[in-house]
Image (cartoon, rainbow, N blue to C red):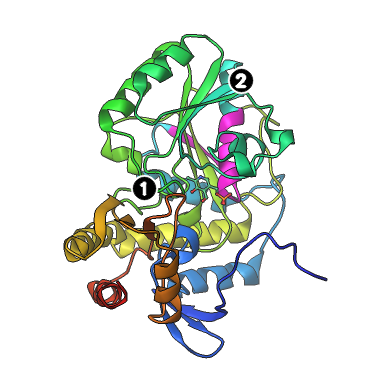
Amino acid sequence: MKLFDVYPLYNVTPVKAEGCYVWDDQNEKYLDLYGGHAVISIGHTHPHFKAAIEEQLNNIAFYSNAIQNPLQQELSDKLGALSGCGNDFELFLCSTGAEANENAIKVASFYNKKSRVIAFKNGFHGRTSAAVSVTDNKKIIAPVNAHNPVTILPLNDAEAVRKEIEKGDVTAVIVEPIQGVGGLDEPTTEFLKEIRRITEEKNVCLILDEVQTGFGRSGKFFAHQFHGIKADIIPMAKGMGNGFPIGGVLISKHIESWHGMLGTTFGGSHLACAAGIAVLDVIRKENLMDNVVEISEYFKKEVANLPGVKKVKGKGLMLGLEFDFEVGDLRKKLIYDEKIFTGGAMNKKLLRILPPLNVTKQDIDLFVQALKKTI
Ligand SMILES: Cc1ncc(COP(=O)(O)O)c(C=O)c1O
């Protein structure tokens, strides 16, 4: 049976991985500066991660959400402690980023009984019903998703947000603290503080989509923590499981839960929790957020004067190099000739760098040398 052909593929077949490196079926070694779409946080096949999953697999991999599963509470406690959100939020577990956003929007709508969502130009929030409707890409919105009431506004236009909210039908404002797929543009602190003020005043939920930015990738546990604001709802996924499908939604304590409000078969399974706990333990024990800050500074310094680089965007290890040309060919050359994975964005001139959080200066040196040669 043929696979439903929705992905354009590079002709590389990874069969093995360790840390920041991946090997293909010809035993060629690649430097992974993309982490499989910002997913690999603590490094491929990390020994603690493997041991934790293996041990859990030997005990129990899965049961439904109708029984006691103390691993969910352990994960929640460790997440609360490391993120600093423990006192103010509660955790709902699911499996993907889109599902996290889908539930975030539902929670907001259940809470204030409104339905219109404000989202922003070039934003990306996933491909399920409500999540795709708040994504600024008409091509991927099917007619069945197009009926959701959504208004897309320019990023950093607080006055436009205020005008829409004053119409009285807005349930939530959803924003990425750093745009991922869109191309590393960021809301300003002033904008975020202003929309926080307006949303609070009008009982509209502020959803900070940390699906890509969360779990230390920005150098803080959540990227919105750079701006001194508090969200009502924080969806997360990607780095949470280092490749194991796990997502979650942090929901502010003033929003009350009730039985049946949300649900999922797979979310919070024993195996998913073991993966999530292992990731949190490694981020903490190996001080990965400190490494993110150090390597980020080093990277920015090393690439600053490369020919063709117009701008270096992003925070921590969620970085983008904006060139004065489209980077499609450059990415191909980096993969096929230099054996380095990098990422693209909706902004065709942007090369995205999303390595595992334990990437080293030597790895960055390899990339910079390859880039100099290729450009
Ligand atoms: C900010 C953001 N939100 C949501 C998603 C959707 O996540 P998933 O692909 O796990 O559904 C993504 C994926 O790239 C993302 O970057």
Rendered position, 277 above or below 258: below
In which quadrant is the N terminus drawn? Answer: bottom right
The residue that mark 1 highlights is 184
In the displayed orientation, state which residue is furthest to the front. Answer: 325
Q: Earlier in the sequence, mark 1 or mark 2?
A: 2
> Which of the numbered marks, if any, corresponds to residue 214?
none
Q: What secondary structure is found at the residue carrying circle 2?
A: loop
Which residue sits at x=40%, y=59%?
326
Q: From this viewpoint, is residue 293 visible? A: yes
Which residue sits at x=63%, y=34%?
130
Q: CA distance from mark 1 to mark 2?
A: 28 Å
Q: Which quadrant of the structure image shows residue 139? A: top right
Q: Which quadrant of the structure image shows residue 271? A: bottom right
- Asked whether, in this view, residue 368 is left or right of residue 183, the answer is left
Q: What is the three-letter code of the residue carrying label 2?
A: Ser
Q: Position of residue 301 (x, y in %)?
A: 16, 61
- Give the total of numbered labels: 2
Q: From this viewpoint, is residue 252 visible? A: no
The residue that mark 2 highlights is 115
Q: Residues within 10 Å of mark 1 (few under 14, many from 20)?
A: many
**222 is within the stretch colored magenta:** no
In the image, which residues are magenta? 89-106
Q: Nearer the viewer, mark 1 or mark 2?
A: 1
Q: Position of residue 46 (x, y in %)?
A: 44, 73
